[in-house]
Every structure is written in structure tokens, then in C-alpha cells.
Image (cartoon, rainbow, N blue to C red):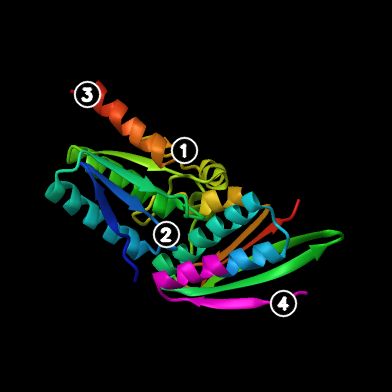
Amino acid sequence: MSSLREMAVASSADVVGVRQLVRSAALEAGLSLVDQTKIVTAASELARNALVYAGGGDVQVEIVEKGPRRGLKMIVNDEGPGIPDIPQALTDGWTTGSGLGLGLSGSRRLVDEFDLKSEPGKGTIVTVTKWAR
Amino acid sequence: MQRVPVLKLGDVLIVSIQIDLEDQSVLLLQEDLADAVVQRGAKGVIIDITAVEIVDSFIGRMLATIASMCGMLDAQVVVVGMRPAVAITLVELGLSLNGIRTALNLEKGVALLDHIRSATP
């Protein structure tokens, strides 16, 4: 049941691979089509962040259970420069790159649980969970 | 990396995205479309995303960029076939794609282009 799947993100082709991995796991976890689309979109944002800001990272996907509920947990991990100001990084429109600044803040809205740990110089770990309804 | 084909029908270009969009493919499509609009003198562009399972902030931003770029080259863009789950996700993500015209399907997209062109002589 708790089959952990892992994948490295080193290129933009891997971001597509992460979407496919998360899509199949979300289907297996029993997420609705809308919820699958939300978690796959969040996965795409977070995997791209790891690629753009840290030069790469890895993604772990696991089907989890809480009582009768099933869900999908995803951990996106990188060893990049880290985020000095996390509340700022979670603000809509804030970016140090060239994007829209919606990757982190938008991903947080697309999932049920969102946790971000980051240490400057060490890296960033984002853990998100989406529960089946 | 896969390339998205650009088809021509009269003075309209039709782009039907049938692949899992890699960032590089989207950037390439942007360049291909700008060239095609100018070379073929297209007045309208229809981008069909019926087969696109997700639109994230990068892809959404590129759609908006393509629309304004083609607008500058005197071609109107209509995005057709967005899936309901994609629309829900985009709004929640915070991307409302305000500058982009949409239609439910290809047929309605063509009708919308005709309407726009008859309204702007």
C-alpha cells in the first residue's frame, strides 16, 4: 500500500515525468479528476521550482491513509540556496526569478496540507498532501 | 523534445497540443507561431488544449504571452477546449488569464474569430 515512488528532477523533461508519476499515484489514491489535476499542477510547479532555483532535486510520492481516507503525499526536496524569507516566498506575486510568483503560493492553495522547510545554503523541502474526498 | 505542429486553414493557424508540454516545447511553439503568423499572413490563431491535462503557471503565462505577441502581429488568438478541471485549477492557482480569449471548442473558436474580425474592420 505505502509504495514509495521516487524520481530525480534534473531537466525540464523530468518535470513532465513528475507530472506523469503524480498523475498515476493520484489515480491510485482515489482522487477525483479535479483533485488529480490540482495535485499534478502543484507537482509541476514545485518540481520546476527545484529545477530553476536549485538546479534540480528529487520528488517522492506516497499513498497515505488516515482512518478511512486515502490521500497522496508528495515531498519535493532540493539542495539549493534555500529560502531566506519563507512568508515572503509564500506571497502571491513574489519572485526572485522571471515567473509570476505563483508557484509556491498557488501550490499551497491547490493542496490540503502544505509544509515548507528551508535553510539558507542547505536546501528546501516542501511536503504536500491531497486527500480523497 | 517534441514540437507542436502549426497548421494553416485559410488565414487561420490551428495549433492542437497533443503532447505533454515540456517548458522547452512551449518556448519553441512561441517562436514557431510568431514566424508562422508573419510568413503566412495569418489573421487568427486557434490553440486547442482539449488534450492538455494540466496548465501550470508557466504554461499559462506562455499562453498569455503568445496571445499578446500574436496581437502585436495583427493576429487574434483564441484558446479552445479547456477542460473543466484545468479551469478550476487555474483559478485556484491564481491565474485567471484575463487577456486570453477562450471558446469551448474549435467550432466556437472559429465563430469567435469571425465575429472579432467583422467587428474590427
Residue at 47%, 67% in the rendered image: A16
Residue B101 visible, this orientation: no
The magenta-colored residue range is A1-20
Name the residue beneath numbered marker 4. A3
Q: Find numbered disc 2 in the image and state the secondary structure of the residue it sits on.
A: loop
**Closer to us: B4 or B67:** B4
Could you tell which of marks 2 and 3 lies nearer the N-terminus?
2
The image shows residue B77, relative to residue A94, as above or below, that is above
* Separation (CA) of disc 1 from disc 2: 17 Å
Are callouts 1 and 4 both on one chain? Answer: no
Residue holding disc 3: B120
Separation of residues labelled 1 and 3 (CA atoms): 22 Å
Q: Which residue type does callout 2 highlight?
A: Gln
Judging by the rendered image, the residue that carries numbered circle 2 is B18
Q: Residue at x 72, y 63 (%)?
A: A29
Q: Is label 1 on the same chain as label 3? A: yes
Circles 2 and 3: CB distance less than 8 Å? no
The foreground one among B104 and A113 is: B104
The residue carrying mark 1 is: B104
Give coordinates of residue B51: x percent, y percent: 47, 54
Q: Are marks 1 and 3 in contact (CB under 8 Å)?
A: no
- How crowded is the residue under tag 2: few (<14 C-alpha within 10 Å), some, or many (20+)? some
Residue type highlighted by circle 3 = Thr
Question: Could you say which is closer to the camera, residue A32 or residue B49?
Answer: B49
SS at mark 1?
Answer: loop
Q: Residues within 10 Å of mark 4 (few under 14, many from 20)?
A: few
As for residue B66 lying within the magenta part, the answer is no
Q: Earlier in the sequence, mark 1 or mark 2?
A: 2
How far apart, in angstroms, are the residues tagged by discs 1 and 4?
Answer: 39 Å
